[in-house]
Image (cartoon, rainbow, N blue to C red):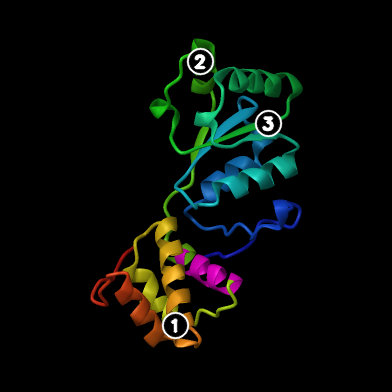
Amino acid sequence: MNQIALPLDWPVADREEDFLLSESNRAAFEHLRRWSLWPVMASLLTGPRKSGRSLLGRIFAAKSGGRLIDNATDQDEELLFHAWNTAQTARKPLLLVADLPLPQWSIGLPDLRSRLMATPHIAIGEPDAPLMAALVEKLLAARGLAAPADVLRLVVPRIERSYVGVGRVVDALDAAALARRRAVTVKVAREALATMGVSEDRGGRS
């Protein structure tokens, strides 16, 4: 994976971890980077839980001077309507972040629906194997644990291909290392996978 942090002129909000760039999220990143070319001054960003969508949104708002509305489907429709209109008038981008794409929203305000229908939608996909490995390594490092390459080769092909799955295996590796009072090794990783009910025969995920 082309494992890089966001360019240095994109400040990380709230001193959060760097947003890792891979093929799973590159299209969303590139769309936000080119916000001045949007057909309207608004976009909708969706993605799985724990995918970094909110972090990317905060970085985008800090860089562009625009507005971020997270969990957009839970917000008042009048608020969304006026935020969309204000973005067009002020020429300041509005980024809505949500779980679901627009067709799955329940919108009662016709004027809001028509505006959102004209709003570009971008999505962060489930993590690819290089991104999963990078996330396991980064999340373990945040807990003071190293992730040797042989551990990553064992673990990554055998876990659920999702951001939640990455979080679960990091929790399991952390717990196994703590129980043994040792670093994360292949033996510790095997024990962690066993506690998750994952067989070593399971592998080959793309």
Q: Residue at x 42, y 57 (%)?
A: 164
Q: Is residue 144 above or below residue 167?
A: below
Q: Label 3 sits on what residue type? A: Pro
**Distance from Cα at disc 2 to Cα at disc 1:** 56 Å
Q: Are marks 2 and 1 in contact (CB under 8 Å)?
A: no
Q: Secondary structure at mark 2?
A: helix
Q: Position of residue 99 (x, y in %)?
A: 46, 39
Residue lying at 68% horizontally and 21% vertically, measured from the top left: 88
Give whichever of discs 1 and 3 has the lower sequence position.
3
Query: Which mark's residue is nearer the viewer, 1 or 3?
Result: 1
Give the distance between the C-alpha atoms of the residues marked 2 and 3, in whole angstroms: 18 Å
Label at residue 114: 2
Q: Which of 86/3 is in front?
A: 86
Q: Where is residue 93, by image quadrant?
A: top right
Magenta-drawn segment: 132-142
Mark 2 crowd level (few <14, some 14–19, many ≥20, 10 Å Cα)? few
Mark 1 neighbour class, 10 Å CA radius: few under 14, some 14 to 19, many 20 or more: few
Q: Quadrant of residue 32?
A: top right
Specify whether 176 is left or right of 60: left
Residue at image coords 34%, 70%: 157
- Residue tagged 3: 93
Q: Please give the residue where the numbered disc 1 appears in the rendered image.
A: 179
Q: Amino acid at mark 2?
A: Ser
Q: Quadrant of the C terminus?
A: bottom left
Q: Residue at x 40, y 77 (%)?
A: 153
